[in-house]
Structures are given as C-alpha cells and as structure tokens.
Image: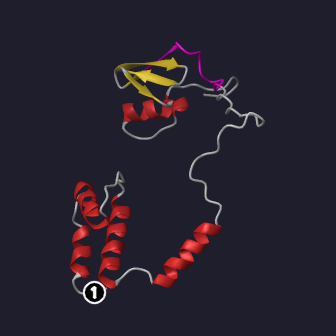
Amino acid sequence: MPADVGPQVAALEHMTVAELRARYAEVFGETTRAGHRTWLIKRIAWRLQALAEGDLSERAHRRAAELANDADLRLAPPKNNPAMPVEHPALPKSDQRLPPPGSMLVRPYKGRTLQVRVLTQGFEFEGTRYPSLSAVAKAVTGSHCNGFLFFRLRQKGEQP
C-alpha cells in the first residue's frame, strides 16, 4: 500500500457512518444507502488503494467482460407466466397454546398486572405491537426469556 493511502485508510476507522457515506460518495462518485460500517470501510479502502496503485489490467477487464457475457445474468425478476401457477406461501398456523385473537393475557409481575392483547399477527402491550410473546417478555423483564413460559401458557397435560 502506498504511503499516502495508509493514513487515509486508518482515518476511516474513526469516522461515523454518515462520514463514511460522504467519503464513499467522494471516492466512488455516487451515493450509497449502505449503513454497514465495516462494509463501507472495506469498500472505501479498496477504492483508495485501487486509485493509488491502479485498477485492473486491460486484460483482466476483457476477461471479466467475457465472463459476464457468458453468464446467464438476470437483471429483472421473471414476468408471471400464466402457464406456471404462482405458489403462495402458506399462512402460518396459529399456536395451539395461544388463545384466539382478541383475547387478553393477564399476568401479575413485580407488583404490576401485565395485560397483553393477542392479535392475528403478534401481540399488543401498552400500546406497542410485538411480533412474539418472547419480545413482550423481554420488554417487561429487560432480558430474554421464553414468552410461553413467562405468560404461563402450556400445552394440555403439561406439568407446571
């Protein structure tokens, strides 16, 4: 790596994601919506090094173009073919341990009475929707725990 690129790459480690996006736009000439800090650092470092040391050789560019022409690249998803039926994903089956949607789960916890409404897709607790009972339990306790155990929902015949 050339001497002038090293400090630039080292400075990337101390930048925020917003600063990295701005730096990306400078070196690539286009903006990015990426927010993954490590990925941004690697891409910018690669580009800085490529600009300093030179890009791929002309022979490598030709070979890459040949490979791209030979590849069956799809740029857009296929159109719906009426001859081929479209399969719809099966709706998730409701868990037998849960009461029907609209029901309330009530549980005393540390001097509070928790009330959770069962929805068709998820749960509502204190005006916030959660995807699972475990997410509700985590919001209440601050640590991960099994939602079915926390709200004491068991299958028939299970011992407490």
Q: Nearer the viewer, residue 131 or 6?
A: 6
Quadrant in which residue 68 is drawn: bottom right
Residue at x 35% of width, y 51% of height: 33
Residue 153's place in the image compared with 26, above or below, is above
Residue 75 x, y percent position in the rendering:
56, 53
Residue at x 29% of width, y 81% of height: 52
| Amino acid marked by disc 1 | Pro
Quadrant in which residue 144 is drawn: top left
Residue 122 x, y percent position in the rendering:
51, 26
In this view, the residue farthest toward the right is 83
**Magenta stretch: includes residue 104:** yes
Residue 46's place in the image compared with 119, above or below, is below
Secondary structure type for disc 1? loop
Q: Quadrant of the N terminus?
A: bottom left
Which residue was labeled with disc 1? 2
How crowded pointer 1 is (Cα within 10 Å; few <14, some 14-19, many 20+) is rated as few
Q: Nearer the viewer, residue 61 or 95?
A: 61
Q: Which residues are magenta?
A: 94-107
Residue at x 56% of width, y 15% of height: 101
Residue 128's place in the image compared with 75, above or below, is above
